[in-house]
Image: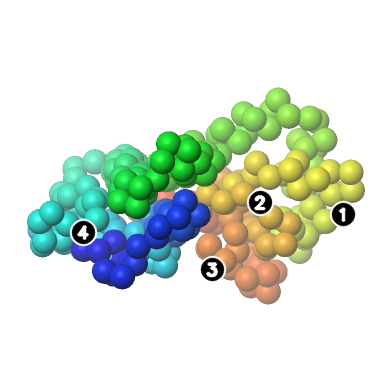
Amino acid sequence: MDGGGGAQYNPRTVEEVFRDFRGRRAAMIKALTTDVEDFYQRCDPEKENLCLYGFPSEQWEVNLPAEEVPPELPEPALGINFARDGMQDKDWLALVAVHSDAWLLSVAFYFGARFGFDKADRQRLFSMINDLPSIFEVVTGTAKKQVKEKSSVSDHGSNKLKSNSKGRSDSQGKYSKAALLKDEEEGLGEEEHGDTLCGACGESYASDEFWICCDICETWFHGKCVKITPARAEHIKQYKCPSCSNKRARP
């Protein structure tokens, strides 16, 4: 398995390796959150050893490990499907997330070693990676808890902004973060709400993107990450994110 890059895909600079890391990470987060039902079905314990692969194109797949020895790239955890039915769903997903984080780091630093990154390059790459929440943090909700803890000690204006947003009408306050923040951003830079992370991809808030909030767990998502458009959101009375919907579907 070439990790989705093909034999010709070899990121050589710190920026290219980080872009590769970010694409693979987004793919694996998608598999474990928004596409979790599909992922669950593909991890049949009756099949042979399966691995979760994330590709730079932000696509994922569950497949058998590479046949070549040694493989061209480090391989992800083997046999994730065998533990599926022996654990609670959330614990199994958390376990896959931990191994996915380890795989992403191994791939990134494989490229670093292969193309001769020096100490400064390795440190810069790790710093860029470390600025993003881990897959485990996104999947388990730890990233959201960290944001809440940080928000609790930040200035009162930011907290007031979030609490006021809940009282808005459904057409503005409930689903579009870009809309609900627009009138209240005077005197508050984007840094004030930059700690808000998408529950699917883990990326930070940006004022030029459409966001939607789950009415159950109150987690924010990019509309594109959960396949909700502004037009569609206007007709949703109560939005439930994929994780909350799955909890109801499979206790």
| Residue visible at 41% across and 41% down in the picture | 118
Q: Is residue 158 left or right of residue 137?
A: right
SS of the residue under disc 2: loop
Q: Distance between the residues labelled 3 and 2?
A: 17 Å
The residue located at (22%, 52%) in the rendering is 75
How far is mark 2 from mark 1, CA to CA? Answer: 16 Å
Q: The residue under label 2 is which amino acid type?
A: Tyr
Q: Quadrant of residue 234 in the image? A: bottom right
Q: Mark 1 points at which residue?
A: 183
What is the number of the mark on residue 205?
A: 2
x%, y% of residue 110? Answer: 30, 48
Gap between marks 1 and 3 measured at Cα: 26 Å
Residue that carries the numbered disc 4 in the rendered image = 72
Q: Quadrant of residue 154?
A: top right
The N terminus: image quadrant = bottom left
Q: What amino acid is found at the position of numbered circle 1 in the picture?
A: Asp
* C-alpha separation, residue under disc 1 versus residue under disc 4: 52 Å
Q: Residue at x 76, y 48 (%)?
A: 190
Q: Which amino acid does label 3 sit on?
A: Lys
- Disc 4/disc 3 C-alpha distance (Å): 34 Å
- Left or right: residue 151 compared with residue 15: right
Q: Which of marks 2 and 4 is in front?
A: 4
